[in-house]
Each structure stands twice: as structure tokens, then as C-alpha cells.
Amino acid sequence: MPKLWNNTIEAHRRDVGDSILDAASVLVAEHGLQSVTMSEIARASGIGRATLYKYYPDAESVLFAWHERQVARHLEELNRIRDRPGDAWGRLGTVLEAYALIIHQRHGNALAMPLHGGKHVAHAEQRLHDLIRALLADAAGAGDVREDLSPSELATYCLHALGAAGSLPSKAAVRRLVEVTLAGLRSQMRLPAKPVLPRGSR
């Protein structure tokens, strides 16, 4: 089979897959997690039921696939933020703030919350831990982060502390939580030198 034809088929499959997941997301937002059926997903996506079953065996599989895509997109976003210009401390603060805001938003998402225990989440959480650990190591190397605890321990501290963002009432409260978390990371030698959150992030 020609490569161009192969690529066209793959692109079509991706488009169909995205349509299915997007339709499921809308249905859950409108009617709730327990109300979604394969018939409704087929109707909302404009895809025949027979075609839908070629992609997913049941509605639960569709919903977990949607959540897996969301988790992957969040990680991509955090990686883009990490790669922006700036010093390690500034990038660390921006990544932690973005993560906390994702947690805050997810708390109100009726679809994501029941699905967050999926197997794909453990792998994503390890990648997230590694991302934050590396930023902490860079910031510690620059003298901005305390060195009495390892970057791995501090990354675990950050993730647990910022998990509280899901129960906070506003984005302003989330940013205050990030400031408190960052204050706990600061090297004592650098406390007066820099603001906790980088300028422009508030």
C-alpha cells in the first residue's frame, strides 16, 4: 500500500477517534457520567454504531480514552511551560502554578474526577514527578532551592501540597497556595532576593 494512502488512512482514523472522544466529553458535561451510552456517542459524533464499535467496545472505554488524552495534553502543556526562556526558579514557579490551576479546574470536571484512577494516570504522574524534580535540581544548582532535602523528596512535597488546589474556591486562592508551596522550597540564603512567584504570573 502506498505511503501516502497509509498516511491518509491514519489521519482519518485519528480524526474519527477525536470526534468520538470530543462527543463523549460534551455528553458527560451535559448529562453526567452515568448517562452516556454508545448510541448517544454515535449520534453526537455523527459516526455509525458499527464504526464506533470498531474503535471502542463500550462507553467506559471511550471515557477512559478521553481522560488519557486530557492527561497527555496537560503534560504537553507543562512541558511547553518548562521550556520557556528564563531561570530555573522562574520556570519552576510557572510550572507549579500551571499544575495547580489544572488541578483546580479538574475538580469541577464531572468527567475527569471518576476516571482519574485509570492505569494511564500512574505513568503520567511519574512523568510529572520527573519534570518537577528536574526543575528543582536545576534551581537547587543555582542556589535558589533548599538542599537539605533531595529534589525527588521536594517534588513529592510539591505534588501533595498542590493537590489541595482542587478544593480551593478561586484561582486567587490557588495562587496563594502556590506561593506558600514555593516559600517552603526556598533556600534560606535567597529568601530576600526574589519574589516567590515570577513577575507576571499573578
Image (cartoon, grey):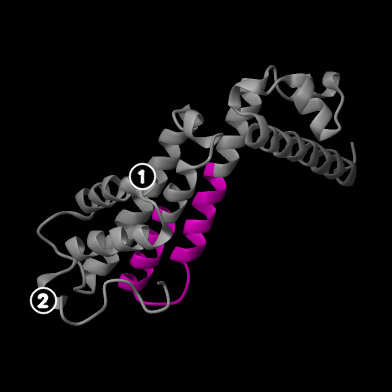
Q: Is 199 positioned to the left or the right of 69 in the image?
A: left
Q: Is 122 positioned to the left or the right of 69 in the image?
A: left
Secondary structure mostly seen in the magenta stretch: helix
**Quadrant occupied by the N terminus:** top right
Q: Earlier in the sequence, mark 2 or mark 1?
A: 1
Question: How many residues crowd mark 1 within 10 Å: few (<14), some (14–19), many (20+)?
Answer: few
Q: Position of residue 128 (x, y in %)?
A: 40, 48
Q: Nearer the viewer, residue 4 or 30?
A: 30
Residue type, numbered disc 2: Met
Q: Nearer the viewer, residue 131 or 166?
A: 166
Magenta stretch holds residue 79: yes
Magenta stretch holds residue 2: no
Question: How many residues crowd mark 2 within 10 Å: few (<14), some (14–19), many (20+)?
Answer: few
Residue 189 circle label: 2
**Which mark's residue is nearer the viewer, 2 or 1?**
1
**Quadrant occupied by the C terminus:** bottom left
Note whether 116 is above or below 104 in the view shown: above
Q: CA distance from mark 2 to mark 1?
A: 33 Å
Residue 167 circle label: 1
Secondary element at image label 1 = helix
Residue type, numbered disc 1: Ser
Secondary element at image label 2 = helix
Q: The magenta stretch spans which residues?
A: 71-100
